[in-house]
Image (tube, helix red, strand yellow):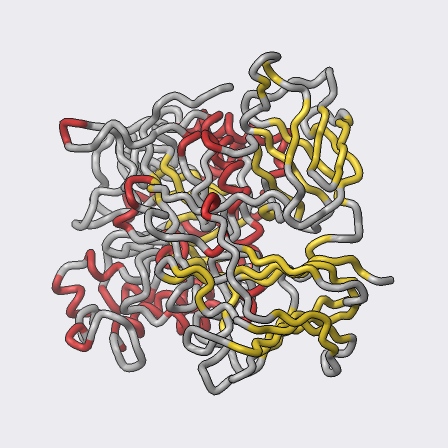
Amino acid sequence: MMIVKKILLSLCLAAVLSLPAQANWNDAESTPIWRSLKFGIYLHNAWGGEAYTLTRYPDLTVPKSIDEVADDFDVDQFVKDIQSFDPEYIVFTAWHASMNPIFPNKAMDKWRGKGHTAKRDLMGEVIAALRPTGIKFVMYLHPSDGHDMSKEDQALLGWNESFDQGTNWKPGNYVKWNNFMNEVFDELCAKYGQDIVAFWVDGGWQRVDRERLKKTARKYNPKAEFVSGWDNAGWCRQFNQISPPDPAKGVPVSIPHDADTWPSLRNNANLLQGGCWWTTGGTAKVSPVGMLRYTVLQVSGNTGGGGIGWAAGNYTDGTWEPQVKEYLTMLGQLMKPIEESIKNTRPSTSYLTPQGTRIATLEHGIVATRSADDAYEYIHVLVPPIDANQGYQHFIELPVPEDYKKFTKAVMLRTGRAAKVTQTDKGLRIDIPWLDAWDPIDTVIKLTVKPGFGLVSREKAISMSGEDVPGWPRSGAVDGDRETGWSSQVAMDTKPWITVDLEDRVNMERVHLFSRVLKDKVGYCFPVDFTFSVSDDGKNFRDVLSIKDHKIEVNDDTAKDEKLLNGVISKTGRKLSADYPQYFKLPKGSVGRYLRITGDKLKDENRMQFTELEVFGSEQK
């Protein structure tokens, strides 16, 4: 077993949200492209003014203007380098500290005066050079960067104009700042918007009218997506929670720095590969093997999209810190033979990777992904099976798939040789060919899914009694993310219902409902009495199963107290919704296009809430 040596790591971690008080902006409906992306390069190339020392010259001297950062950047060589890494996307910085765009912008000149924008349109040149490569372009923005500005600029732009009314934006607050920001944003979207698939927005929304920015972007690109660094990847205070062990500075050596000990995160993670988020003269931190193994782990549980972005800054000429380019190129080469099991995939619904999973403690030694069309499952064997007496086994045994899929054949993805798959009601066994050995990095077995029985409700249309509750949209019931969810309205809705349109007539056999956990109370707002009904037309329903006085089944073995990553993400004292599925077997003859669940008797606020609703069955031709 190859274990990555101790390394220096700084990790941008996704914030754990049980069920958010506010709607996460990048939900499945608004970010379909981002949710399909799994492997990217996250880049900072910016001038920080007097706020920070960001991008440096290769000799580590500090540029004195945004023009110095932009002028000697070799775009052609940079794009060749990016192609050698073979990512699906890059995140490229428009501006960061003190807000100095790396492209000309008349609106910025108008509001702040000259000297804050680059004369060279480096942004436009990079976009144009990337266009024929097929690598998707995501623009990094920091629209709340007023905190880094001088007091004079803050007063000029209205950064503090409504501070006494609170720090959160609301209609009528921060008018001047948002007028300024929107004018700058409108100009850049008019110029580049068609080529930007998403905006990666850092810094939170306290004083920024995000709906206005979204509306502005979609004037030029109706499909533009937004990914909030606040919603999706935590706040700056979490960026450097994992720091190199340095007892002299009070950093305990017990903090893990081994890729096999890092936890999976359901949202986008950006991990430093260079000296910092910008150039410092540091060297590559993570070995290509460590990067690939953690990428696979992260992708297997990444329901929020973006997968992993390996982060590194460039020097002013576009070159890289020592070993960064070489290691990222090697990562691309290692990934190439198995990239179909990583890129444009979805987390497996057969073998789940809960947030916080680590390679070092995998229960069965595997994680899994699935193809976007759900035709294939990819089993990633990261810890090969070992028999205490005979050494490595030439087979692997897995439990029954959670979505009850059936598999018809197995192929070793690297070699194309057929493996033997045996499936029973007790689980799955895969015997690998004798000409193949377990790959010490990642053995990938491609399973062909038998058409027919399986999960049929994922991302299907939902109707409900009443209107959506803010932060609990109907789509949250079937988005595949068991830490978001759906809620009925308040007590006036005495018998709430939720209906999923399966699009075709389905012989429904099983329903799995996931309960909310609030302050360790499992089953909060889960109904006491409820009824399952089916329909062919969505109007006339017939009851097929009624549940009375339901008690939540709790398996505490799946919710072990566990402290993750120096307290940045912690399960300690907190149980997760995904740990508590409630299983219901429907009677024979439960056939229809629609399934409805009606809450007949409620508790806890008189609401009915599910963090996920899963229907299993087979289409009726």
Q: What is the quadrant of residue 612 in the picture?
A: bottom right
Can you say whether 69 is above or below 109 in the image?
above
- Say which of 347 and 384 sits in front: 384
Can you say whether 567 is above or below 317 in the image?
below
Q: Is residue 358 left or right of residue 507?
A: left
Q: How many marks?
A: 0
- Say which of 322 and 4 sits in front: 4
Which residue is located at x 33 percent, y 33 percent? 9
Q: Is residue 319 visible?
A: yes
- Residue 62 percent across, percent down from the top left: 21, 38
- Residue 365 percent across, percent down from the top left: 55, 30
Farthest bottom residue? Answer: 492
- Residue 210 percent across, percent down from the top left: 38, 69
State which quarter of the image contains the C terminus.
bottom right
Which residue is located at x 35 percent, y 58 percent? 230
Q: Is residue 403 left or right of residue 295?
A: right
Can you say whether 93 is above or below 584 in the image?
above
- Say which of 531 and 76 sits in front: 531
- Residue 273 percent across, percent down from the top left: 38, 33
Q: Is residue 219 visible?
A: no
Which residue is located at x 58 percent, y 61 percent? 513
Can you say whether 440 is above or below 71 in the image?
above
Farthest top residue? Answer: 390
